[in-house]
Amino acid sequence: MWRTLLLLVIMPVAFAETDNLMPQRKQVLQELLKNDCGACHGLTLKGGLGPPLLPEALAGKSDTMLVDKILHGRTGTAMPAWEKIINVQEAHWLVQYLKKSR
Amino acid sequence: MIRSVVFLFFLLFFQPVLCLAELRGTGDLGVIIERASHSALIINTSDRSILSRIEGLGDVSHASVVFSRDQRYAYIFGRDGGLSIIDLLSGKIVKRILQAGNSIGGAISQDGKLIAVSNYTPGGVKIFSGDTLELLADIPAFYNDKQRSKVIGLVDAPGQRFICSLFDAGEMWLIDVKNPKQPKIKKFQNIGKQPYDALLTPDGRYYLAGLFGEPGLALLDLWNTEAGVKRILGDYGKHETKLPVYKMPHLEGWTIAGNRMFVPAVGQHEVLVVNTVNWQLIKRIAVAGQPVFVMARPDGRQIWVNFALPDNHQLQIIDVKNMELIKTLTPGKAVLHMEFTPRGENVWVSVRDENKIVIYDTNSFAIEKNLTANKPSGIFFTSRANQLGL
């Protein structure tokens, strides 16, 4: 019992590190980034109503903070909470993806 | 013999010219933006056909279009600050400049001679000559001494003026361009937090900005600017939890039908009906999701609504007579925009993820035709050329 609970707690973190998203899901997330995040952050993520999400802009910002912003949004700004559409593991993958220069 | 040779020569040389000079009006043409491929289609709404594709327009992911008053030229405002003039007859780019780093939209002046562009970075408005795209005035949107605000909701207004709103500053600026090189600016401050888009009523009298940072709308009466900017619907949704807004509504599509205005709620899955005489809320109509465009058929009898993620595969239609939903359509994945033919018998709908344009009969809701387009977004018909605020 305790073991399963422990597993449940650890799992999201473990998943986040081991990047085992299905290729199809990655494709969907990339499209989401371009089209839907792009509506505010720009198709090329150079910024718009929301700030730029290019590697230079995100370098030095903590993953935890960025993942938190994606999942829970920022009250008082236009950044919505995406937790109904994106899970923790996917948010981690998105942050890694955004931080890599492409 | 010599005569026929000369004649042949004549034919050879002049035929291409003759072809190009084929007589055609432009009142039934339009432009469809293809957001992923930096291109646009020129279409004909009478034959429902695609005439040509224009490439090399830069980042047009959020592009908007205005038309010259002769309806021959389209001005395309790109996200990357690109401003392109397209000749709808020849299907060519006539002129193209990069005027800013990050841009949101534009407008054409009452006399058709000036083009204004609103920019995010560097925040401000630029005024250009419509013919040459020569820069006539650069108006930085300064507030709090040194900060520059993103500018949104730029439209033309009667009296050779433009109006815009400042997202970060919470201001409205009324810009008189009778002398375009020396614009006169009247500023309205503290209009509300984060105006995110705005519209001019079709009669050119009221300018309304939607607020994101607090409930309600900011209203300026251009017949009585001395009265300043008023807040309307300030109590709406105040005590309700705001649902996440995955896409900002667009207010260009805000709609006046008779003395009722239909506007998208922000953070509620509702279309609001407002009385335009006393600006009170008449009704809240529950719809399928966060509305993005809320547009009236030109005769004002129907309102068509599309939605933000995850409800963006649908369209809903409201009957204005009873203010009730009468139909739900599912054109396909990612319904981004719609445009009515000038008298409203058809509506063209862009379905981004299915690479198609669906043309509906607005009376029977039957699909009349599908056209193929590459990730289509905005659809703009030349009939906009003669409408205030578009």
Image: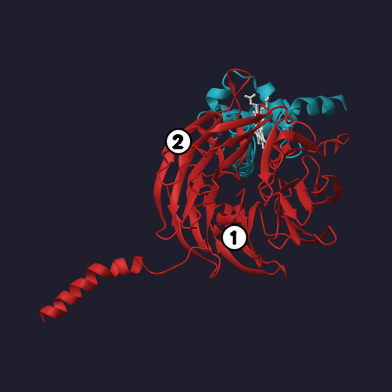
Amino acid type assigned to the residue bearing label 2 in the image: Leu
> In x, y percent, where is residue B388?
61, 50
* Badge 1 element: strand
Choose top left, top right, bottom left or bottom right for residue B316: bottom right
Seen from the viewer's position, the closer of residues B174 and A99 is B174
Residue B181 visible here:
yes
Chain letter for the cyan part: A
Choose top left, top right, bottom left or bottom right for residue A42: top right
Q: Is residue A71 left or right of residue B95?
A: right
**From the viewer's perspective, is residue A12 above or below residue A31?**
above
Q: Work out how far the residue at label 1 is from the one at label 2, CA to CA, in angstroms.
A: 38 Å
The residue at which mark 2 appears reads as B136
**Which callout, 1 or 2, points at the residue further toward the start of the chain?**
2
* Badge 2 element: strand
Chain letter for the red part: B
Q: Which mark is residue B357?
A: 1
Q: Give me the chain letter of mark 2.
A: B
> In x, y percent, where is residue B36?
52, 47
